Image (cartoon, helix red, strand yellow):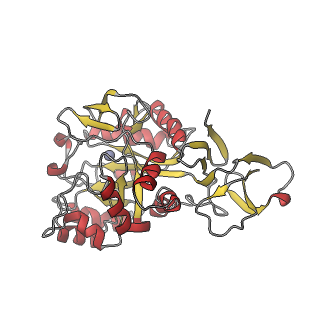
Amino acid sequence: MKAIINAHYIGVLEHKEDEVLLFDTQIISWCKESELPINTLLIDAKGAYVSAGFIELHIHGSANADVMDATLEALQTISSSLLQTGTTSFLPTTMTMSNVSITKALQNIKLHKKSVSGAKILGVHLEGPFINTLKHGAQDKAYIQLPNKALIEDFMHEVKMITLAPEIEGAKAFIEYLAKNHSHIVLSIGHSDASYDKSMESFSWGISHATHLFNAMNTYHHREPGIVGAVFDSDITCDVIADLVHTHPSTLGLVQSMKKEKLILITDAMRAGCMKCGSYDLGGREVYVEGAKATLLDGTLAGSVLKLNDALKNMVQHTDMTREEAVYAVTKAPAQKLGLKKGQLKVGYDADIVIFDEDFSIISTIVAGEVKYRAS
Ligand SMILES: [Zn+2]
């Protein structure tokens, strides 16, 4: 058993000031330091912040590996490199590519999801291919297709989230079928040109989330508020890429004030995440990375190089979001969305824990009770 002492706990309601966190692979209890069982291994947080590990719902790659590489090595590289960002579990995210490529990526995850030794794989997020050609963003238009079950039938346990456009042909029946028969799959509006009314309608079919709000969708207009207006007027959850490139700080502040605890932070990072500037591949397309920006050759934004802990830092620095709210947006909010016993330092929950400083720089990352990363 292990316990964390001298910690400033975040996002914990039911513990007293003088109690410490005791855990094994799961959280065992909150107790006084003097009451810890003998042989408890003490981890000294030295006054730093401690919260549940961060959960990432949308990530294509990191450290020069991509989910679409469809190898165990790629998943392992991503899983290990995410530890330095405080991420303890994630949804590897596929791109809109050929059926052969997507199937390979899905098979790879199905086969190896338990084999990675860093951040845990929670399942798959399918970004496309059931999206609108008008809002393809960095997804390859040539591979966009109409919604169909055939592509995912063999992977219903792995698929945990699908980003799709509800206005395209066949989407209504597809959404209603999944919402009824596979309710564990989060259906998210994105890469879509849906109107306000169509968006609202799709929420009643089973859409319960919006992917990288503002990006790859129509803009808010006072006579046609579109997807953004519908998201603001409903209680569905949504996520944003808080890299200050995909979304202006003022817009981040707006979405924070409108959505509160319904807001989740993601990175949408591609293989250049945690890498240097240069040229990389994303879904078969060349992407150039300079500073915080990743673009296709025509200038279209293409994924990000954001680290999840920096998303929290950006939100706290540039909006009214508090440290507690930022942590909530990458712990409890995504965990509840996926129905997981994670995201909270609560008895019986997985002991996924992160220790970080004032600036959200990661000091230590613990996955299922094991210290997997320590800043050097
Ligand atoms: Zn993406």
| Closer to the camera in the image, 79 or 293 | 293
Relative placement, left or right, of 254 versus 45 is left
Q: In the image, residue 279 lies at what x, y percent? A: 30, 26
Q: In this view, does 124 lie above or below 347?
A: above
Relative placement, left or right, of 181 versus 6 is left
Q: In the image, residue 143 lies at what x, y percent? A: 20, 42
Q: In the image, residue 197 lies at what x, y percent? A: 18, 71
| Closer to the camera in the image, 140 or 324 | 324
Residue at 24% across / 71% down in the picture?
200
Relative placement, left or right, of 143 versus 44 is left
Q: Is residue 35 above or below residue 363?
A: below
Let me know if residue 355 appears in the view. Answer: yes
Q: In the image, residue 3 lies at what x, y percent? A: 74, 52
Q: In which quarter of the image is residue 273?
A: top left
Count the labels in the image: 0
Q: In this view, does 15 lie above or below 51?
A: below
Q: In which quarter of the image is the C terminus?
A: top right
Q: In which quarter of the image is residue 230?
A: bottom left
Let me know if residue 123 appears in the view. Answer: no
| Closer to the camera in the image, 360 or 53 | 360
Residue at 73% across / 63% down in the picture?
30
Q: In which quarter of the image is residue 188?
A: bottom left
Residue at 47% across / 50% down in the picture?
313
